[in-house]
Image: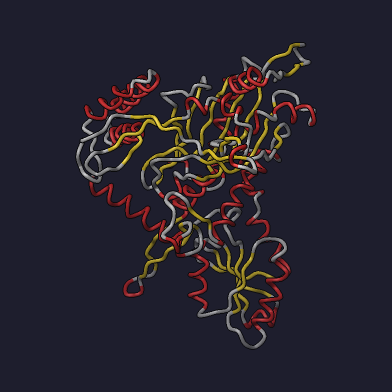
Amino acid sequence: MENKKQDTASALKDIISHAKEYGFVFPSSEIYDGLQAVYDYGQNGVELKNNLKMVWWKAMTMLNDNVVGIDASIFMHPLTWKASGHIDSFNDPMIDNKDSKKRYRADTLLEDRAAQYEADGQADVGKALLQKMAKTLDAGDLEAVRQIIIDENITCPVSNTANWTEVRQFNLMFSTQVGAVSEDASLIYLRPETAQGIFVNFLNVQKTGRMKVPFGIAQIGKAFRNEIVARNFIFRMREFEQMEMQFFVRPGTEMEWYAAWKEVRMKFHQAIGLPASKLKFHDHEKLAHYANAAVDIEYEFPFGFKEMEGIHSRTDFDLKAHQDLSRKKQQYFDPEINENYIPYVIETSVGADRLFLAILCNAYKEEIVGEGDQQKQRIYLNLHPAIAPIKVAVLPLVKKDGLAEKAQEINRSLKFAFNTTYDEGGAIGKRYTRQDLIGTPYCVVIDYQTMEDDTVTVRDRNTMSQERISIADLKEKLGYAVSMERIFEKLLV
């Protein structure tokens, strides 16, 4: 077990190092020694993340006639968070180790122990532990949670001791003030989730869009949580991005839609390149106060299976709470049954940063190529062509004899169709390697034969195979291969 932990830690370390070295993710404010649990996306990272957001957005709003999008403000009236329950109950149970002075989420310690039981072939023991934890947390019995940690002999990984403090609840919302003068300023919050911006706009969208239940509202946006324990690179951050869709349904049909969206969302992750063997559903043992059913789609990160997306049946909790507090009706008139009601909601919520990390972990490949004395290690990113930061690299074999000018002409002809890069520096093999390391699926090489017959060599990133293609056919053939349509086709099967 110790060797396995070392292997997974090493794997994550390699990915973090690669992400920084090749322009994917940088520590924020690094010249000032950084800020814990805050990261910046570099030139390749922002392209990859934007592609993931775009494919999610189109899969939601373009492929579904009854789903539309909005972009709500980060700042909202503070009563929003009173109605949603965040002010009163948006807490995490925290526990400190007295020897190391390190702080941990108590539920995370127990979830990790349950995962260890499952990895050791004792899934029933792990499930029983999670059920016991859920029961004590539901009852608000924090002393019982501490006792479970002690009974399980869970120790701090830094001090290796079980010298724990009591368990305490910490509210995770960031607060700030709005107003020109501090004495007159009002207390407001940075939103801890994007869902409430959808709920308060439910009737605005329904009426202006003449939407009929069932219908959905999608949104991509930043959220903020004062995570006391932030770890595992960009998996858990204080500033993060969510991609959420709230699907409004007739009461009594919610479980049918819940099951349907579970399958749709699992299919999405496989379509963008995550293997089925590294994905699984994990039903919640402890339900949130607004839910009557909840499941996570988990991906097997180097640090184990962890939540990447949540699908929740939120009942009518949110709309009803906003109706009660605002005293403005949040009802829909259903002409099919001639009845007014508050719709129930099915939520799909995926973390853009967690999806980014899953894609990056899955794409990172190390392999040995060549034979005998010619063997060497090769590292590349096996990204789906549709989400790769750069789709095509245009490379002249040499810079002289008009090859560079011809390559620049080809690059100009392709760059308006998809993201390309031009590189003429260094040996062609080193330029291939540079593109492999950032996941570019295709390299187009302009050589002396190009000057004779207007053909180029197209190199495939994964197989390293090469094919001769006419310049006239490049845009169509490469455009087809890197189009998001290749993903959407899999979703519509």
Residue at 44% from the left image edge and 44% from the top image edge:
236
Whole-percent x and y of residue 213? 71, 23
Q: Considering only vertical position in the picture, is 213 above or below 374?
A: above
Evaluate whether residue 265 shows in this view: no
The picture places residue 376, in percent across and down from the top left corner, at 36, 70
Outermost residue, front side: 183
Which residue is pictured at 65% across the width and 38% down the height?
60
Nearer to us in this view, 316 or 256: 316
Number of callouts: 0
Q: How is the image coloured?
A: secondary structure
Residue projecting furthest to the bottom: 401
Residue 284 appears left or right of 249: left
Between residue 402 and residue 294, name the one nearer to us: 294
Q: Position of residue 491 (x, y in %)?
A: 62, 40
Q: In the picture shown, does residue 140 fall above or below 385? A: above
Of residue 245 and residue 227, the one placed in the foreground of this image is 227
State the image coordinates of residue 105 (x, y, percent, origin top left): 36, 35
- Placement of the N terminus among the 4 image quadrants: top left
If the image is split into quadrants, where does the C terminus sit?
top right
Please say whether residue 70 is visible from this viewpoint. Answer: yes
State which quadrant residue 20 falls in: bottom left
Which of these two is toward me, 315 or 376?
315
Q: 71 left or right of 34? A: right
User: Which residue occupies 68% across, 76% down?
Assistant: 408
